[in-house]
Image (tube, rainbow, N blue to C red):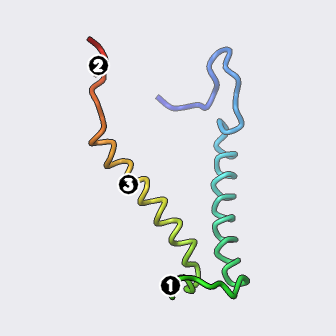
Amino acid sequence: MAHDNKPAAGEKRRWLDDPRNVDKVVYTVYGLCGLSLLTDLVVRGRHGHFPVEGWFGFFCFFGFLASVSLVLAAKALRIVLKRDEDYYDD
């Protein structure tokens, strides 16, 4: 069955229901990530605690890796914390 992106009867259509708007959001995020990476060329004179903090784009890549690590840790934790559907039933 193909998804036709039409709202159900009586359901209001939201702006993210249109795939073109989702693409706009994704490209905006890509642009902001690129812009934050380019600002690293302009901002100088940072005084980090470790020499690695002076590398080009370190904080962009560190933030990305930290986000990916959090998602992977949450997926692993879900396996440990997951309960049966009728866990709270008597």
Is tag 3's residue or tag 1's residue first in the polypeptide sequence? 1
The circle drawn on residue 29 is none
Residue 36, position as x, y percentages in the image? 67, 71
Q: CA distance from mark 3 to mark 1?
A: 26 Å
Residue 80 in the image: above or below residue 45: above
Report the side of 63 relative to 41 (left or right).
left
Residue 27 in the image: above or below residue 8: below
Residue 85, position as x, y percentages in the image? 30, 23
Amino acid type of the residue that numbered disc 2 sits on in the rendered structure:
Asp
Which residue is located at x 69 percent, y 52 percent? 24
Is tag 2's residue or tag 3's residue first in the polypeptide sequence? 3
Report the side of 40 relative to 88 (left or right).
right
Q: Which image quadrant for residue 53?
A: bottom right
SS at mark 2? loop
Residue 10 in the image: above or below residue 22: above
Look at mark 2 in the image and give the residue it sits on. Answer: 86
Between 15 and 49, the one lying in front of the other is 49
Q: CA distance from mark 1 to mark 2?
A: 50 Å
The reply to whether callout 2 and callout 3 are in contact (CB within 8 Å) is: no
Which residue is located at x 51 percent, y 65 percent? 64
SS at mark 3? helix
Look at mark 3 in the image and give the residue it sits on. Answer: 72
SS at mark 1? loop
Look at mark 1 in the image and give the residue it sits on. Answer: 50
Q: CA distance from mark 2 to mark 3?
A: 26 Å
Residue 90, position as x, y percentages in the image? 26, 11
